[in-house]
Amino acid sequence: MRSRFLPVFLSNADVELHQLIPFLAAGTLEGQEVFLRACRGYRARGCAAFFLSGRALNLHLDLQRSGAAYAAYTVHGLEGDKVTSHAEPFFDAVGCGDEATARLIARHASGEFKPDRELLEDFLYVRLLMQRFSLESTSAEVASTLAAFEAAVEEGPESSRLGVCRALLARDGDAFHAAFQVLSDEHRAWYEDGFRAGRLPEERWALDGCLFIEGLALLRLAQSVGIPIASEYPLIPSLTLALPKLVHSADAWREP
């Protein structure tokens, strides 16, 4: 089921981007939150355009813009302002195949956990993926982060994200797909339940809840270590899985 308000969501995102980006590009607005707002706008516009047109290029181009915008922020952002687990733009870059931008985001992301602004398991999840796939981290560094991640979630319910990470590190296709299915189901349920209960607006359900960009990124990472993937997934249409031929541009975000 698709929302009948998709054209409105697309228009709203486009208008906000054209209002916001000039200030960011000129440097009159700065900080992680305002850049994340711009990245959110690009992601929303790309998702809505894909659902309306069926053309994955619309999605991939805006995911690239999101990643590039956040990379521009991380290079110059204050260390104390950066929250590593707020990683949607990192997943956007990986999802559209822009490895250079993903590496840049990872290189300048904070290596410090911010306990007043993020959960430890969220930080370690993103940090582990960055270390393994976008940074030149040693095996010992990756293993240390994995151990910390395991310790952070050992007293809670089983973590599907930890299962995905373990499978990626082990290059275990069966384990990856089992954990990925659970993660995808959790993603769908969180947005559907939130929308039905009135905790989330329809836009969040219709875009983030129906197109799993983080999942798309994880499938790209799985492919990079030789794990075969299916041609389509419930929240990841086959058209989005085809690797786009995009030209990396650090300034792509400056022209909405």
Image: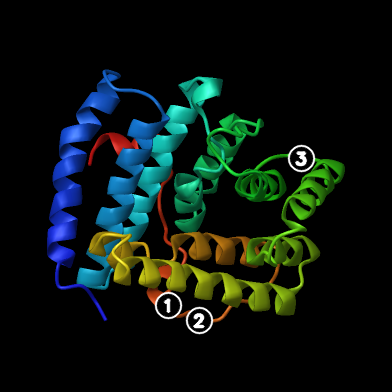
Q: Residue at x 43, y 74 (%)?
A: 235
In the current view of this chain or complex, which residue is farthest to the right? 140
Q: Choose the circle earlier in sequence order: 2 or 3.
A: 3
Percent x, y of residue 207: 31, 64
Q: How many marks?
A: 3
Amino acid type of the residue that numbered disc 3 sits on in the rendered structure: Ser
For the residue marked with disc 1, what is the amino acid? Ser
Up-down relation of residue 37 to residue 59 (above or below): above
* On screen, residue 129 above or below 52: above
Q: Which quarter of the picture shows residue 248?
A: top left
User: What is the secondary structure assignment of the residue under circle 2?
Assistant: loop
**Which residue is depicted at the point 28% across and 69% down?**
55
Where does the image place residue 165, in percent across and percent down from the top left? 70, 60
- Dot 3 falls on a residue whose secondary structure is loop
Residue ID for mark 3: 137
Task: Please tell me whether residue 122 is drawn above or below residue 135 in the rendered image.
Answer: below
- Mark 2 nearby-residue class (10 Å; few <14, some 14–19, many ≥20): few
Q: Quadrant of residue 224?
A: bottom right
Badge 1: how crowded within 10 Å, few (<14), some, or many (20+)? few
Q: CA distance from mark 2 to mark 3?
A: 31 Å
* Label disc, if present, on residue 231 of the rendered structure: 2
How far apart, in angstroms, are the residues tagged by discs 1 and 3? 32 Å
Foreground: 66 or 87?
87
Q: Earlier in the sequence, mark 1 or mark 3?
A: 3
Q: Residue at x 33, y 53 (%)?
A: 43
Residue 132 visible, this orientation: yes
- Rendered image coloring scheme: rainbow
Quote the CA–CA distance across marks 2 and 1: 6 Å
Could one spot residue 210 in this view of the protein?
no
Judging from the image, what secondary structure is the residue with disc 1 in? helix
Q: Quadrant of the C terminus?
A: top left
Q: Which residue is mark 1?
A: 238
